[in-house]
Amino acid sequence: MSDIITPNISQALYRYLCQNIVGTEDHVKTIRLMNAMRDNLQSDKSFTWITSGSYGEGLEMRGSDLDIMQVRKSIQVNADKQPDFNPSITYLSMDTDDVKPGFTQLRLEYSRDQYDLECCEEHNGKHYFSSALWKGNILLFGDKDKFKDRV
């Protein structure tokens, strides 16, 4: 029964937001399409760009920020299964032991890229991806084109 109620509530909330908060359903669809087009134009062989959050969903709400994710195509994160090995790919695995529910640590399994090692911290003989080191390097090396030269 709850399987039927949940989608109905989600759709009703979506319609309410469209009609009363952010504009018509067509306006929301247009914003989503524009975001998808921009993401496609920015993406290349090294990176995929994804506009996310409320704006990515087409909801232009007052006070809302713009969230953009950058996906580096040369990194693969695996939860359980081991993929076919490709030496040009950096492999990370999800380690959910001793972390809060809903979170994971990304353990470096393989990389031939020195930059990836610079973005990791060692704990108990294993290397874990550090978002703080990653962000620091992004700030250090600047825009996407300069960053691509490092990867």
Image (cartoon, rainbow, N blue to C red):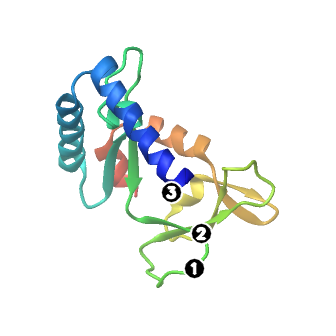
Q: Amino acid at mark 2?
A: Ala
Residue 141 can be seen, yes or no: no
Image: 10 above or below 23: below
Image: 109 above or below 3: below
Element marked by disc 2: loop
Q: Which residue in the structure is indicated by mark 3?
A: 115
User: Mark 1: few, some, or many residues within 10 Å (few <14, many ≥20)?
Assistant: few
Q: Amino acid at mark 1?
A: Lys
Please tell me whether mark 1 or mark 3 is closer to you in this view.
1
Q: Amino acid at mark 3?
A: Tyr
Question: Given contact means CB atoms under 8 Å apart, are the residues at marks 2 and 1 in contact?
Answer: yes
First in residue order: circle 1 vs circle 3: 1
Quarter occupied by residue 17: top left
Coordinates of residue 87 in the picture (x, y in percent)? 45, 79
- Residue 129 placement, left or right of 38: right
Residue at x 23%, y 45% (from the top left corner): 36
User: Mark 3: few, some, or many residues within 10 Å (few <14, many ≥20)?
Assistant: few
Coordinates of residue 122 in the picture (x, y in percent)? 73, 58
Label for residue 79?
2
Label for residue 93?
none
| C-alpha distance separating marks 2 and 3 | 23 Å
Question: On the rendered image, what quadrant is the N terminus found in?
Answer: bottom right
First in residue order: circle 2 vs circle 3: 2
Element marked by disc 1: loop
Coordinates of residue 49 in the picture (x, y in percent)? 32, 47
Label for residue 81?
1
Residue with the most extreme top position: 62
| C-alpha distance separating marks 2 and 1 | 7 Å
Q: Nearer the viewer, residue 137 or 131?
A: 131
Element marked by disc 3: helix
